[in-house]
């Protein structure tokens, strides 16, 4: 299947991967300054909410070949019992959306009709600020397995597959198929290889949220939500939509809808994992507050991730959701995605 045509659009070449970097571009400078400014303020979540910014490689859109029928998740007593296998380091890619499919995939995705099951994962706890990098990576991969429990069935029942991403914790600049990851207070989902990269300082020196388990979990669940978006053709649809938007503002709005949906799905997944994690209401509030303190400046029509309060609102909506459809940010009015 051919790749979509990515027109060169002066003004917003940099923020997303399908578009080659545009050197002569004031917008890039503005964006960089914005990121730096926010980073100085300690708002790492914004950086996290920019999973592709330094990752310029586009995903490799290939038709989804016939693949082995996955065994759905379920409980041990039903025929859909499923245990997460090891990370899939070479998954196939979902079908690339056709232009006439995009609106339907974004606004009426079959995933929205599904139910998010409660996870039963018995996750252990570790002391994040003092754990070794190996222990941190193992912990995040254990959480990933639990996220698979949460998402596998609704994604499967919606007609898609959900291969398990790996989580790589990096403590120095690391090459990925999407480019090099350098900042240690960021996390990324790379659609090219469908794996997740997690900067170590998110767990060890994350400002006033240092060592806050719920914040780390929120970030990981947010990146996983991008994987869910990719597998259900939502991310691909937005990647088609983005470079064809009528204006920079419209392109940014589509990115905010994507990111805010990921915030909401993060909350929904953590809610489903609440008992497995032993997540307290206080921890939940810390996660929401961390998002409230990170985000695009308000008001900022060119913001691509949503303001702090907007992101916090969607995260909170997610904590009360038991269906992915509650997080349909693609049909709400503009003022709910600012
Ligand atoms: Zn994001």
Image (cartoon, rainbow, N blue to C red):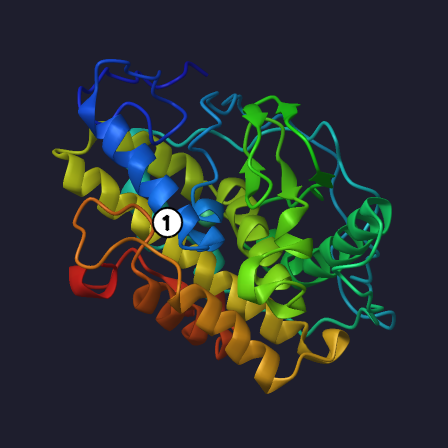
Q: Is residue 184 above or below residue 143?
A: above
What percent of the width, then of the height, locates residue 16?
Answer: 37, 30
Is residue 337 visible in this depiction of the protein? yes
Q: Quadrant of residue 33?
A: top left
51 shown above or below 24: below
Q: What residue is shown at x 73% (from left), y 55% (from top)? A: 72
User: Of 269 and 313, which appears nearest the observer?
Assistant: 313
Q: Give residue 182's quadrant in the image.
A: top right
Residue picked out by circle 1: 38
Screen quadrant of the C terminus: bottom left
Q: Nearer the viewer, residue 21 or 221?
A: 21
Query: Residue 207: horizontal and vertical position, in percent?
Result: 55, 59
Name the secondary structure under disc 1. Answer: helix
x 28%, y 14%: residue: 23
Q: Is 21 displayed left or right of 324 in the figure?
A: left
**Residue 286, image x, y percentages:** 53, 75
Q: Is residue 142 above or below residue 85?
A: below
Q: In the image, what residue occupies the spot 82% across and 63% down? A: 79
Mark 1 burial class by Cα count in 10 Å: few <14, some 14-19, many 20+: some
Residue 288 vertical position relative to residue 1 in the rendered view, above or below: below
């Amino acid at each position: 299947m051919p790749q979509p045509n990515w027109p060169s659009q002066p003004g917003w070449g940099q923020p997303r991967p399908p578009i080659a970097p545009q050197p002569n571009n004031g917008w890039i400078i503005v964006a960089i300054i914005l990121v730096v400014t926010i980073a100085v303020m300690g708002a790492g979540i914004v950086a996290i909410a920019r999973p592709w910014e330094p990752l310029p490689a586009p995903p490799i859109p290939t038709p989804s070949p016939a693949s082995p029928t996955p065994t759905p998740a379920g409980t041990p007593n039903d025929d859909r019992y499923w245990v997460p296998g090891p990370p899939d380091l070479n998954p196939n890619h979902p079908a690339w959306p056709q232009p006439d499919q995009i609106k339907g995939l974004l606004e009426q995705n079959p995933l929205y009709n599904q139910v998010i099951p409660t996870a039963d994962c018995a996750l252990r706890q570790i002391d994040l600020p003092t754990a070794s990098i190996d222990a941190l990576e193992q912990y995040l991969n254990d959480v990933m397995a639990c996220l698979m429990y949460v998402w596998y069935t609704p994604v499967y029942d919606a007609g898609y597959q959900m291969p398990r991403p790996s989580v790589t914790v990096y403590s120095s600049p690391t090459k990925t198929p999407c480019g090099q990851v350098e900042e240690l207070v960021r996390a990324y989902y790379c659609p090219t290889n469908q794996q997740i990269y997690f900067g170590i300082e998110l767990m060890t020196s994350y400002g006033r949220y240092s060592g806050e388990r719920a914040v780390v979990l929120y970030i990981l669940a947010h990146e996983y939500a991008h994987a869910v978006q990719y597998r259900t053709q939502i991310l691909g649809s937005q990647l088609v939509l983005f470079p064809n938007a009528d204006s920079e503002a419209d392109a940014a709005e589509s990115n905010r809808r994507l990111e805010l949906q990921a915030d909401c799905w993060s909350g929904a997944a953590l809610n489903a994992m609440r008992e497995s994690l032993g997540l307290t209401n206080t921890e939940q509030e810390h996660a929401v507050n961390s998002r409230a303190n990170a985000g695009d400046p308000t008001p900022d029509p060119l913001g691509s991730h949503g303001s702090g309060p907007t992101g916090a609102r969607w995260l909170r909506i997610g904590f009360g959701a038991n269906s992915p459809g509650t997080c349909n940010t693609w049909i709400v009015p503009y003022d709910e995605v600012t």
